[in-house]
Amino acid sequence: MDTTLASLSSQVGELLRRRGWLLATAESCTGGWVAEAVTATAGSSAWFDCGWITYSNEAKQALLGVTDATLHRHGAVSEATVAAMVAGALARCQANLALATSGIAGPGGGSENKPVGTVCFAWGLRGGATDTATCHFVGDREAVRRQAVAHALTVVLERYGEAPPAGASHAKSVP
């Protein structure tokens, strides 16, 4: 694992350990890379509960309870869908905090409204608010996915703990 992801994972782990929280992940375009990054950190069993890779719409529905209506109205790559993925993850595990990703890593699959590099994120606390964001990343498929993993972990630090190291996330949020 590269040094940026290793550092982010270590920082997230320290934050979660201090708070006594467990993390869950619900991933689509990142294909489990967030979970892989955090479990590569020694001691992660103390702060990582579980993860889902729900690449297809059917998996999002069956495993996380995302409704057909949400998928049809907003699409799989939407803030509504990732918010539903977070809610589904928190309902199905012991984690205090869940994050979700869904996007278009490329090289194909993009559209005018959702170009390649579009990734939607959600972060939610059990019994608390869920925050969402949409970012556009540049680069090839691996670069988009890697930036999405870094962004997901960076925002955990920003929203629930300390600020990340400079340059950890190079996302451009869209309104």
Image: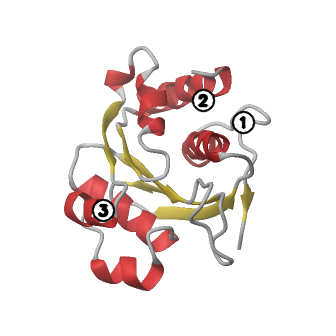
Q: Residue furthest top?
A: 42
Q: Which residue is mark 3?
A: 60
For badge 3, the amino acid type reads Lys
Picture quarter with the C terminus: bottom right
> Vertical placement of 151 versus 9: above or below?
below
Picture quarter with the N terminus: top right
Q: Secondary structure at mark 2?
A: helix
Q: Which is nearer the eye, 111 or 36?
A: 111
Q: Which residue is mark 2?
A: 8
> Vertical placement of 113 versus 29: above or below?
below
Alpha carbon separation for disc pair 2 and 1: 8 Å
Residue at 67% in and 41% down: 143
Residues at marks 3 and 2 touching, judged by CB atoms closer than 8 Å: no
Q: Secondary structure at mark 3?
A: helix
Tell me if 3 is positioned left or right of 43 in this view: right
Q: Which is nearer the eye, 144 or 174?
A: 144
For badge 1, the amino acid type reads Ala
Q: Earlier in the sequence, mark 3 or mark 1?
A: 3
- Give the mark toward the camera: 3 or 1: 3
- Give the mark toward the camera: 3 or 2: 3
Residue at 61% in and 67% down: 110
Q: Position of residue 173 (x, y in %)?
A: 72, 62
The reply to whether residue 121 is in sight is no
Q: Residues within 10 Å of mark 3 (few under 14, many from 20)?
A: many
Q: Earlier in the sequence, mark 3 or mark 2?
A: 2
Residues at marks 2 and 1 touching, judged by CB atoms closer than 8 Å: yes
Q: Which is nearer the eye, 90 or 58?
A: 58
Q: Which mark is residue 76?
A: none
Alpha carbon separation for disc pair 3 and 2: 27 Å
Q: Position of residue 78 (x, y in %)?
A: 51, 71
Quarter of image, res 11: top right
Q: Which residue is mark 1?
A: 168
